[in-house]
Amino acid sequence: MNYFKSNQRKEEELSFFNTDFFQLCYGFYRARETMENEEKSQDYLVFQEEHGTLAFALCDGVSLSFYGDAAAQFLGDKLVAWLMEQDELLYEEGEALFHAYLETLTEEATKYIEAVPVNSHLPPLVKSVLEEKRDNGSEAMFACGRIDALSNGLYRLFLSSGGDIRVRFFLYDGEEVSQSKLETGVRWSTKRGLIGEKAHTVIQKSCAFHKLLLYSDGLALLDEKRLGNDEIKEAISHSLATPESDDISLLEITL
C-alpha cells in the first residue's frame, strides 16, 4: 500500500512517485506568513493507492471558521478511508452515496472540534472569539475522488468537489478538456454538513482523460494556463515569494 498525508506544519517539496498504474506528482507548502509565524497550513492533502485503486482528497480549511485546518484534516482522512471502502455501487449511485456520507460525519466531527485546544498564548479576547466560532463549527472546501485501474487497461473515475479547489482534466497531447467550476458557497461544515448546492460530481466508467490536476487557490495563477512541470515549479516559486501568498497544495495524477 502506498500512502501519503501532508504534515500541516511542514513543507513537502514537489515530489514524484510511480506505481504500477499511476504516475503521481504532489507538493505541499505553507503560505509565507504562515511559515514565518510557525502556524499550521489550512490545506491538507492525502492519498492512498493499493492494488490499482487510488483514493485522494485535497481540502482547504475556511479561515473564518474555527480552526479550518482541523476541518480540512478531519474531512480529508475520512473521505479517503470511505472511498477505499466502496464497491461497484460508487460508479452507479456515487453522487447520492457521497452526499449521504457527508451528512453522517457531523456528530463525530463536532466532538472532534470540541476537543481541539485553543492556543494558550493568545490574548483573552481572541480566545473568546474563537470559542464563539467553535459553537458554529469548522469548515473546509474539498476535492476528492477514486480511480480504479481495470483489467482491460482502462480506468474509471469518481470525483466530487465543493469550493474553490481547482480540478482540471487533460488529454495525452496536453489539451485541457475540462475544468471545474469554482463555487465558494459550496463547502462542508463539521456542524451543518454540506453547505450550499450539491457538490459537483464526475463519474466516468471509462476515463476520457490522461492527466488529472488538483490544486488549492494558492496556485490560482496557474488557472487557464497550459501546464508542464516547469510551469508548476515556476508558479510555486512565484507564489511563495509574494507577501500575500496563500497555502499551496497540489496533486497531479497521470494514467
Image (spheres, rainbow, N blue to C red):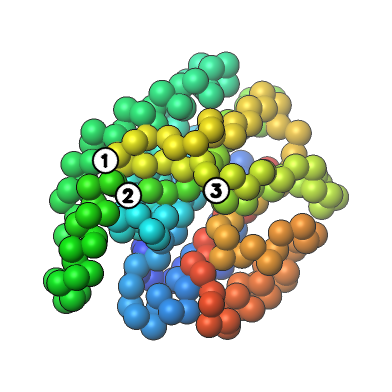
Element type at mark 3? loop
Q: What percent of the width, then of the height, locates residue 139?
A: 38, 48
Q: Earlier in the sequence, mark 2 or mark 1?
A: 1
The amino acid on which the numbered mark 3 sits, given as a three-letter code, is Thr
* Number of residue marks: 3
Q: Tag 3 or tag 1, which sits nearer the N-term?
A: 1
> The residue under label 2 is which amino acid type?
Ser
Residue at image x 77%, y 57%?
224
Residue on which disc 3 sits: 184
Q: Amino acid at mark 1?
A: Ala
Q: Are marks 2 and 1 in contact (CB under 8 Å)?
A: yes
Residue holding disc 1: 109
Q: Quadrant of residue 157?
A: top right
Q: CA distance from mark 2 to mark 3?
A: 15 Å
Residue occupying image coordinates x 66% and y 24%: 205
Query: Taking 108 as reference, is 5 left or right?
Result: right
- Residue 59 shown left or right of residue 153 in the figure: left
Location of the C terminus (image quadrant): top right
Depicted 129 relative to depicted 202: above or below? below
Which quarter of the picture shows residue 130? bottom left
Give the alpha-carbon distance from disc 2 to disc 1, as whole Å. Answer: 9 Å
Give the image location of residue 94, x and y in percent: 52, 23
Percent across and percent down for residue 95 are: 53, 24
Check whether the beta carbons of the residues at disc 1 and disc 3 lie within 8 A of each other: no
Q: Residue at x 44, y 37 (%)?
A: 195
Is residue 52 visible to us here?
no
